[in-house]
Amino acid sequence: MFDPDWEIVAQEYPVFLLQSKKSQSINFGKTYSKPKLLTDTIFCDYETIDSANFQALFDNNSKAETTALISSEKAFSGKNSVKLKAENPYSNSYVFDDINRISYFQISAWSYGADRKSHIVATSGSDFYMVSNDAVADSLGWKKLSLSFWLPQNLNTETFKIYLWNSGQDSIYLDDLQIIKRFKN
């Protein structure tokens, strides 16, 4: 990657697409365009706070959560996480401006609390509902939740949303939310 004869033309960590600078000068009358972005990842560790608007932000500066649900009591990384209680069991709903271009989602978050009470939910009203509470635990009691799915072709995208949910009576903490979107070709 540090060879001056090559340049990075696309990247999605940990993958980089390289192109030889020499091949650009030999184009044989053809025009080439940069490749389209096929995936996009947004991430929130609940550390970036917009205090003027009372919200935590994803790494692309879009709203991830209201500050009312942010807690510094426990965190998987950094100092903050989302605390969901029985009386307030749902996170902010995540909607996507580019939903009509997305074909596949891969979502993960770290959870601390009662077993099988933390959930990642994807829904589009009564037409589509997926939930996951399967988790792999680490040695400190944090569990990695994950949900992956293909979007149905006839999905009502106007009502599609993703959110985190606490189905138990005890508080849970969620941190390091990652949403990977794979786009249609």
Image: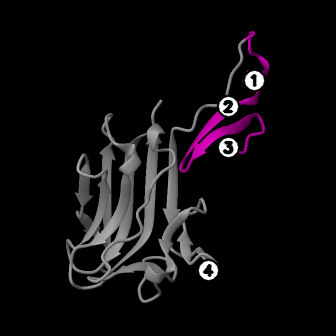
Q: CA distance from mark 2 to mark 1?
A: 8 Å
The local crowd at label 3, few if under 14, some if 14 to 19, many if 20 or more residues have their Cα within 10 Å, is few
Of 9 and 38, nearer the camera is 38
Mark 2 or 4, nearer chain start: 2
Above or below, 57 against 114 in this view is above
Q: CA distance from mark 3 to mark 2?
A: 10 Å
* Relative horizontal placement of residue 128, taking residue 1 as reference (left or right): left
The local crowd at label 2, few if under 14, some if 14 to 19, many if 20 or more residues have their Cα within 10 Å, is some
Instruction: Tell me residue 86's x, y (percent).
Output: 26, 82
Residue under circle 4? 51
- The stretch in magenta equals 1-29
Residue under circle 3? 1
Task: Tell me which residue sits at (49%, 75%) in the image.
Answer: 66
Above or below, 16 against 79 in this view is above
Residue under circle 2? 19
| Residue 157, picture quadrant | top left
Given this view, does label 4 or label 1 mark the residue nearer the observer? 4
| Residue 1, picture quadrant | top right
Given this view, does label 3 or label 1 mark the residue nearer the observer? 1
